Amino acid sequence: MPSTSPSTPPETSHDTPSSGTDSTQQPAEATAPIVTIYDVAKIAGVSYATVSRYLNGHPNVSKASAAKIDAAVAKTGFAPNSSARSLAKRRTHIVALIIHYNSKDVYNDPNILSFLDSANTRVAEEGWQLVTLLASNDDATSNIEQLVASGFADGYILFTFDFNDALLPIFAKRHLAAAISGTGYDRKSICPCVDVDNIGAMAEMIRYVLRDDNPPADRRRTRPAYISGPLDMPGAPERFTAFNRVIAERFGTEFEAPVAYSPKWSRDGGAQAIRQWASDGTINRIDCIIAASDTIAAGAIDELHRLGRRVPDDIAVSGFDNSAAATACTPQITTVDQHIERRGAVMADIVIRQINGEHVPDLTMMPTELIVRQSA
Amino acid sequence: MPSTSPSTPPETSHDTPSSGTDSTQQPAEATAPIVTIYDVAKIAGVSYATVSRYLNGHPNVSKASAAKIDAAVAKTGFAPNSSARSLAKRRTHIVALIIHYNSKDVYNDPNILSFLDSANTRVAEEGWQLVTLLASNDDATSNIEQLVASGFADGYILFTFDFNDALLPIFAKRHLAAAISGTGYDRKSICPCVDVDNIGAMAEMIRYVLRDDNPPADRRRTRPAYISGPLDMPGAPERFTAFNRVIAERFGTEFEAPVAYSPKWSRDGGAQAIRQWASDGTINRIDCIIAASDTIAAGAIDELHRLGRRVPDDIAVSGFDNSAAATACTPQITTVDQHIERRGAVMADIVIRQINGEHVPDLTMMPTELIVRQSA
DNA sequence: ATGAAAGCGCTAACAG
DNA sequence: CTGTTAGCGCTTTCAT
């Protein structure tokens, strides 16, 4: 009876639970009874190839079969096993978003969640799945490295990598569908970048803060200072360059503006800069602060308040990002909107197109917008 | 020569790229040449079963073979395909963390990232992979439903589901390894819960705010008001219950304290409550506000400042969570630390233990801590 | 339109 | 210690 040829594949455990006597109710607890495509085929009375075809939307399946299959699927609650499917199709239909941060720093970036949501939505539209991997320590990072090498996903979105990131080499080596946020990496050897024109946008902001056509003469800002973001992370060097350029152009190359370096994109970095400037007297020689991000600006404003300075009356402060920190602050922060909530979708799109074999640009620049509020 | 018996399996495309002449450099571009365990076996000169054994840390592999395999792996950059591995082992080694939020609300929850980091670290320790799925819209949610049914992960951590969540039924139906954050679901039918004693913790806070042993007599708070979180989400009902109880116990059951309902766990909800109370005069009849979360408290404080009220001099405000919002505020917020940064690890642990077949408690309560700062 | 057969890349008994 | 033999559950020619 068991003809050696697998006309219906190996009848191992595949058999509807109790095909006949359903008397002895098992003690339950058992792992969910795996229902396979063979079970469905048997119940529907068609070959499993037909079930597969139907489920994958192939044209040639009769209405009769379709109906029977629908019924069987409904009855069994069948869902095709994702590993088996991926193995057979050599496509996982997964796009992985890798967030690389040194653990606690993650919390300082108010942009992450909106970026994530944006990418998630775009990928979901495609019927694929976005999964987020958090590389926040060495363990996690090396696991992820392994995962990437194992073909876990069809494409990758890289977020917040510093220039020396341990994960970068694997993307440089293997030719994977990917996109990275920010420029300044050794671009050719990695993957397509998406960024904003940090230099242009920051320059616009600084010119706005230093504007002399608008406010009353006694409010014109002439003594600027800068708080930089971490220079080993994308965006920070460019924004700093913009500051140096505009200052040189406005006040001459010999003009020396105070500069502080925040080691992270955090409120704390902003607060520390102010404390330092307060202790060395710099604070009395400046009338506006250009901060490299909203969080840094917010931290600075907090500390200025603590020292009894009024913002913007005594000193103006500008930010960058238009993140939640900008509006949660009093006064609300004048900033640059880099539309981070669209960046995720744009990057997802670039990855998807690569997966589909399309060509994508090496560099995509997204627009920015000056948002004038009360802080500057 | 091709002996029909698959001693070395089907020699389809498996052959090291140019095994001999490496003259004609291909135009590159091609998809990464898939290197399999067969390639490694062939190069190492052993059977692929031996390679598999060695790579999976089985005891019986000779040093000689091991060395040859190491060399072959290094040479080829081989990494076992994750789909094939999962299919054969019937284990994905993936734990999925599902975050369910109505899109933009995600940004209002400052707890997410620290929770995520905590879970991520715990899962990575195990050598498994945590992946985060964001159910922020219908598309994404139904994709995730499908994914869960397809055995995408070995276990699931459920975060921020409201009581009527569309994803809950699938966990109730299939018997999956999972853990959910918060109580108040129809527990028996879903999965193990992890929570804090919201009632106890909030009661402690309220008693602290209303304390009469500590502050000068003219600062004793006797006219409390409450701003509730969204009552369809875990935690909110319990905290509200605590308020009602303590107030009744302190001032009698007929005492009516003003109550506002924030539709989300957001700053905005706190601000709106204050605006409402300002417009109807309630604001003049209260001297302390118990807010259901730090974000709500922060929004309330902002708005109070805008109205020229001093916190805590004119009115005290307390929060809950000890999130970043609590310290980013001036004055810093007196709150309850629920150690969300440990919750992720605890939940991950519960899921892992289920996967390993261990028994886990239906309900795990985590400790809380009253954090006294300046706002109350 | 549908069944049979082969195979995706890997693990895991089972014999030696 | 190692090779052989079966699958894991699904997709995809290839005939029919």
Image: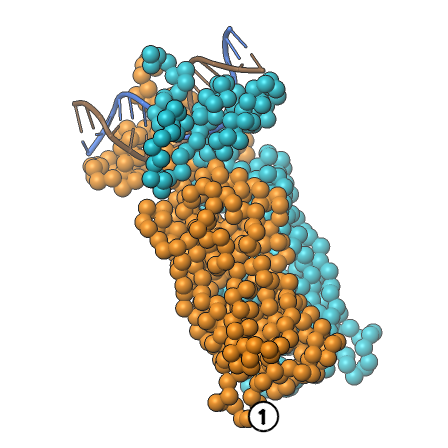
Chain colours: A cyan, B orange, C brown, D blue
Above-or-below relation of B292 to A286: above
Q: Which residue is drawn at 38% across and 29% down?
A: A22
> Split into 4 quadrants, where in the image is the N terminus of chain B?
top left
Tell me where residue B57 appears, x and y as whole percent: 27, 41
Q: Can residue B105 be seen in this view?
A: yes
Badge 1: residue crowd in 10 Å (few <14, some 14–19, many ≥20): few
Q: Is residue B185 above or below residue A70?
A: below
Asked if one can make out residue A241 in the rendered structure from this viewpoint, the answer is no
Q: Which amino acid does label 1 sit on?
A: Asp
| Quarter of the figure with the C terminus of chain B | bottom right
Q: In this view, does B146 lie above or below B233?
A: above
* Residue A93 vs residue B326, the one in the foreground: B326
Coordinates of residue A272 in the picture (x, y in percent): 54, 77
The residue positioned 64% from the left and 75% from the top of the image is: B258
Q: Quadrant of residue C9?
A: top left
Q: Which residue is drawn at 58% across and 58% down?
A: B232
B337 vs B271, left or right, is left
Chain of the residue under label 1: B
Q: Label 1: which residue? A: B218
Q: Which residue is drawn at 56% across and 27% down?
A: A70
Q: Is mark 1 on a helix, strand or loop?
A: helix
Q: Between residue A358 and residue A16, name the one nearer to us.
A: A16
Which is more toward the observer, B317 or B40? B317
Number of numbered discs overlaid on the protein picture: 1
